[in-house]
Image (cartoon, grey):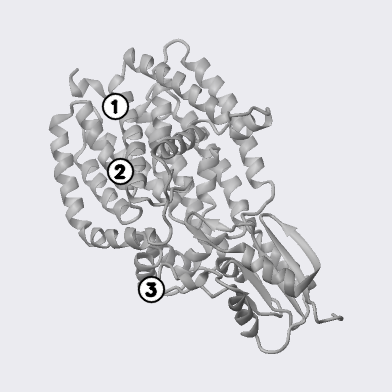
Amino acid sequence: MKPKQAFPPAVAISKRSWLLITGAIIANVAITVPLAKILNAWIDESYTLRTTGQSLQYAIHQAIHFELQPPLYFALLTLWRSFDHSIFFARLFSVVCAAVLVYCAAQLSARYAPRLDPAWAAWLVALNPATIWAAEEIRVYALGGLCSALLMWTFYDGYLAATTSGRARVLHAVIALISVYTQYFLGFVLVAQLCALLVTRRWSVARYFVVFMVAVGVCSLPIGYVLHQQIAAGTSTYFSDESLKSLVLDIYGIAFYYVLPAGKLISATGATHASRYLVVVGILAAVAVAYILLHAEYRANAVAAWTIALVSCVLLVVAFYATHEPFGYRYMFVTFTPIMIALLVTIAELQRSRKYAAALWSAIFVVASFTQLYSTYQPLAKGGDWIRVAAFLELEEKPNQPILAFQTENAMSLEDYYHGKNTIVAVPRPIDFTVAWNEAQVVQSDRDIEQDIASVPGSHPYIWVVNTSECRDFSVDYHCPIFEHFLTTRYTEVLRKEFFHSEARLLRARYSVTR
């Protein structure tokens, strides 16, 4: 095939489609903004608030040496928060990134899947639980997903289009550099794009790509210098022995969730061994996709999209398996756009059944998405439910009742919302923000807890205890039995209130007889 005939130009987006795309953005914002106001910050978000709550220099230093991440997101959020220090405003940065991602989805559809109405892609992304999740995180994920989309956009215009653009290649290089300083995993998308050029035999423009990426690599040397140290520091405490098979299944499951978030629907049917069903569906889908691509008119578009999606996912598997970094679903959001584009181009290549397939998929997707969204956000809280916990404590507490927060990180999240009479005591130690991990943050004996209580002046016949059910985080054991044994042998429970993934208890010392 001749390269310049293989990739069609982007289609013009009609006025009707623009109205629908605008509606998708509005719908996305209508969901994400209220949630951004209502939901409490969880532990990772509390870390972000402290990293970005001081000077720009402090944010960059903490990003590299404490967060163990590239510094750009934290620097940008620090500047953003200089206008308003509220938690809601901090979360709005991700909300804006997610809304722009919806717009990018329409532009990408117009390029990679010109037979489809771009508005369909916009709605597919706008209502996707993954997009809404990213919008509600005061973390890098929404910005990382947006960078991934911009890389896909400029890559098409600069390297895949029938008439490539030198300006787009420069923009692609600039976004690539921004991406490397934003989230390391975006580098996998760049490698996957080079593979797409090679697979589609775009030899001439591949040379330009290599030259620009060498320049990006040279400019990335400062952050590359600290990457090895960050990996070593991160895995010295938190490490994973997850098998290669398990990692592959994890990433496949997340990719399936992006395309069709049907997990809650499957659970609602009472189906057992759902993961086995998903594997069978995946095998059948792979056969169907291979057949569709074999007969595709715009085969190069589909091959390029699938190459980027698959290679990005494979590199994630390799990276986590090789480094023993603990894998989390949040790290995979950089592949969200490539996976969704691969879905779009496949549906676009269906012949007479294209409209029916898109309609059927849309119907199932909408039901699955709203089921998932309701299930996820029905509590109107994130893990810990710290807004309600703080309100409950302020209502029920009396002076001289220290609040023991176990484990240590929960104290940090509770402090974001508690403004009551008593002292929050992190058990066993407050977080040391000068190092990525401090072993002293894990309870080792009753003596640790005794010292924590003694750190608050006076005698305390009553104490509050706030904790979650988390007792282990990958390789770190928080020693919940030690903590609970200490409480049961020295205190009697007076009051208990359960919240979303947390609880608050009022305890009376056994030697005390009055409140």
244, above or below 472, in the image: above
- Residue 58, numbered label: 3
Looking at the image, is mark 3 or mark 1 nearer the viewer?
Answer: 3
Question: Can residue 419 be seen in this snapshot?
Answer: no
C-alpha separation, residue under disc 1 versus residue under disc 2? 26 Å
Residue type at mark 1 is: Pro
First of labels 3, 2 by sequence position: 3
**Whole-percent x and y of residue 251?**
44, 38
User: Quadrant location of residue 504?
Assistant: bottom right
Residue type at mark 2 is: Phe
Question: Can residue 166 be seen in this snapshot?
Answer: yes
SS for callout 1: loop
The reply, left or right, for residue 192 in relation to residue 94 is left
Residue type at mark 3 is: Tyr
Q: Nearer the viewer, residue 346 or 239?
A: 239
**Whole-percent x and y of residue 183?**
35, 53
Q: Which residue sits furthest right?
A: 514
Q: Classify 10 Å Cα crowding around label 2: few (below 14), some (14-19), many (20 and above).
A: many
Residue that mark 2 sits on: 188
The reply, left or right, for residue 133 in relation to residue 351 is right
Residue in the picture at 55% in, 40% down: 129
First of labels 1, 2 by sequence position: 1
C-alpha separation, residue under disc 3 versus residue under disc 2? 29 Å
Residue in the picture at 48% in, 70% down: 50
Residue that mark 1 sits on: 9
